[in-house]
Amino acid sequence: MNLLKKKSFLFGALFLLLLGGATLYVLHRELSGQDIVGTIRNADIRWVLAAVAAMILYAIADGINIRRCLKLAGYEISFAQMMKYSFAGFFFSSITPSSTGGQPGQLYFMAKDKLKVSHSAFTLLCALLSFQCAAVVLGVLGVLFSNGDVFKLQGKFAYVFPIGFALNLIIILFLFCVLFTRKIAGFFIGIGLWFLKIKGMKPGERFGFLRSFAAYRKAAGLMKKNKSVFFKMLVVSFIQIILFYSVTFFCARAIGCDSLDWFTVLRIQSSLFISVSSLPLPGAAGVTEYGYALFYDGFIPTELLGSAMLLSRFCSFVLPLVASGLGLVLLSVGKKKK
């Protein structure tokens, strides 16, 4: 027993060390050579606090969607648990290419809380589907209200929006098929069984795998019978994304750009997010900053553009990354003490 506890402690320490290293790397990459302290010092703190509040509500909205879907599967989770899963999603999405680490990170913490993998996976796929649907709808509306300006971009960036839109649409179709089409879901179960056979299937492992699939399909059936649950998740996702996009507006106002209105920011951010969110870079690093400068050229004065971009990236990415990492550590340590 002591050996198991020692191994668990060593694994936890190594895990936290890796998380800390990844966080420091991302922070160094984001803030290297940037005078964020000077930018915040010269900004209107009221608008900065509004941006921070928007990101806090963004995280809560994400947790609400997770809790709502888990409740449908028969789980009652606390506010602290829902925030832990929300923090895990943001943190691991931020440090992995194309945000691919978000759901596996959430699954890890759900498994530690003794939630069934089948129910956890179904919940996260539903939450992702509602988020992608809201993002694509807002992205299309953003392009329509901008009179197709995104298609007038020159150079390599001219292809980014069509590629980003296509990738997000493919993700939505894939999620619909996996969640609600029995044959497609069965196909992936067949792949899973083949993988287990290759690595050497242990006695009872096949039964356990199929039982998990049955639980997954049961959860999908519950969602089909309770369509209002997904509709509520979709509404929350729209609010969540609008809060996220509003951070740019608050940061622009914080550094003195009074001519930029909220609706203009909403349509520009919708187009920009669809363009870069699926690119294979941690947090869409680099291309997000370039896209920001390109999309907001003419809307934010040139002398303020750099400060607005830096403050927006700090409030919507760097600060939440640190907060979500610390939140994960505190909530995990708090649970162990309890």
Image: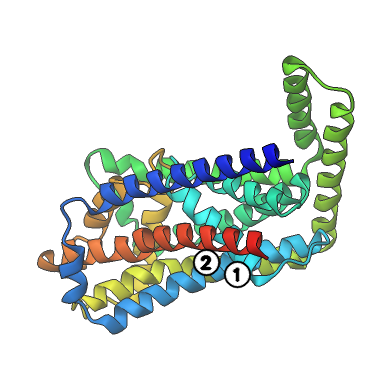
Kind of residue sitting beneath label 1: Val
Identify the residue position indicated by label 1 in the image: 236
Identify the residue position indicated by label 2 in the image: 59
- Which image quarter is the C terminus in? bottom right
- Which colour style is shown? rainbow
Residue 333 against residue 228 in the figure, above or below: above
- Going by the image, does 59 lie left or right of 231? left
Q: Name the foreground residue: 111 vs 136.
A: 111
Nearest-to-viewer mark from 2 and 1: 2
In the rendering, which numbered label is found on residue 114? none
Q: Residue at x 18, y 78 (%)?
A: 256
Residue 22 against residue 196 in the figure, above or below: below
Q: Residue at x 64, y 51 (%)?
A: 109
Instruction: Give percent across and percent down for residue 170.
Output: 56, 41
Instruction: Give percent across and percent down for residue 187.
Output: 76, 29
Disc 2 crowd rating (10 Å Cα; few below 14, some 14-19, many 20+) is: many
Q: Name the foreground residue: 166 vs 14.
A: 14
Residue 111 against residue 248 in the figure, above or below: above
Name the element at disc 2. Answer: helix
The residue at the far left in this view is 303
Instruction: Give percent across and percent down for residue 160.
Output: 35, 43
